[in-house]
Image (tube, rainbow, N blue to C red):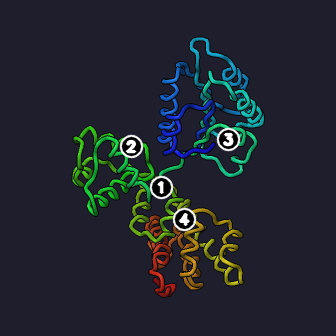
Amino acid sequence: MQLSPPQLSAHLNKGLKSLYTLHGDEPLLITEALDAIRAAARTQGFTERSSHTVSGANFDWSEVLAACGSLSLFADKQIVEIRIPSGKPGKDGSVALQQLVEQSRGNESTLTLVVLPRLDKLTKSSAWFVALESGITLEVNPVERAALPQWIAQRLAAQGQRVAAGEEGQRTLQFFADRVEGNLLAAHQEIQKLALLHPTGELRFEQIESAVLNVARYDVFKLSEAVLAGKSARVQRMLDGLQAEGEAEVLVHYTLAEDIRALKRVKDAINRGSPLPMALREQRVWGNKERLFERVLPRLNDADLAQLLHSAHLVDGIVKGLKQADWPSAPWQALARLAMMLCGLCAVVPGKATTGHR
């Protein structure tokens, strides 16, 4: 049975199951989900806990199986936690996990918790993960930027605080989100700080502005989505953040150039008569990027893409130390110019003609 994090509390109120698998790459939400399960277990007599971290191909699974299959020496009920940081249990681990699932059935004295990182589609179809799905599985995904203001508002409400109603409050939440984007654990800490600094009730923008640190963390993949969405202010903010964090210029360039090349390949396929959905599948464009490509491609003409490809080639040289006429010599300035070129084309108002020379 699959649950989402918001469903966990209601599920636990109805009673515990014997096997839970949590997977995802958001440490704060994983920790909170584990804490909620442990708290519910303690109220039902699970007073002993052991933890096992799977490290390397030579990990001894017999110890885990023995722990899950035996009664506690000191308590009627026990919690056994199994962490697999790599998400790859290996051949022996695959067999052991399937055996563990069998042991958990009808075992009311042992609560087994399996903790995994974010899993790809192939791993989710593996025999051992399919076996784990016979218990309760909880996929914990990061809070996306669009949902972050609401997430902040909910966390503030939980501690008796709120922002102003209407547009002023939305501006405050957007400001808060800009400062903590990509760093949910720090966002949680900043929210807790507000509870220490200010009483319950409404928080003014000035109070949040002076209290909340700029702890945002960005990655190049989110930068790619922001560029394709045409969000120029956010793109500049992310570029500044990536530069401050010491991200490699070559990786940022590769991400931008690869998007441009993919747009060109899909456009060429459409020009040859392929339907857009087929062209996207052939170029392995999936998920959020697929939706962004679908929105952007009708606005781009061949001249736009030719200019972008040429510009990406020039910036490749700048990143590697070459000078290019009419381009900034500093790599990050050149990357910003390339990103804004693509961003500007993606932000064109529907119906407005593109010229390829913005």
Vertical comparison of 347 with 236: above or below: below
Which structural element holds mark 3?
A: loop
Tag in front: 3 or 4? 3
Residue 69 in the image, given as x and y percentages of width and height: 69, 21
Q: Quadrant of residue 270?
A: bottom right
Tag in front: 1 or 4? 1
Question: Disc 2 designates what residue?
Answer: 188
Q: Earlier in the sequence, mark 1 or mark 2?
A: 1
- Residue 338 placement, left or right of 233: right
Residue 357 in the image, given as x and y percentages of width and height: 48, 85
Residue shown at 58%/45% (left/top)? 139
Q: Earlier in the sequence, mark 3 or mark 1?
A: 3
Q: Earlier in the sequence, mark 3 or mark 4?
A: 3
Tag in front: 2 or 3? 3
Residue shown at 54%/74% (left/top)? 295
Residue shown at 54%/32% (left/top)? 15
Q: Closer to the camera, 262 or 286?
A: 286
Vertical comparison of 223 with 199: above or below: below
Q: Earlier in the sequence, mark 2 or mark 3?
A: 3
Question: Disc 3 designates what residue?
Answer: 133
Q: Verify CB contact (< 8 Å) between mark 1 and mark 4.
A: no
Q: CA distance from mark 3 to mark 4?
A: 40 Å
Amino acid type shown at disc 2: His
Q: CA distance from mark 2 to mark 3?
A: 30 Å
- Residue 140 placement, left or right of 337: right
Q: Verify CB contact (< 8 Å) between mark 3 and mark 1.
A: no
Question: Disc 1 designates what residue?
Answer: 144
Q: Earlier in the sequence, mark 1 or mark 4?
A: 1
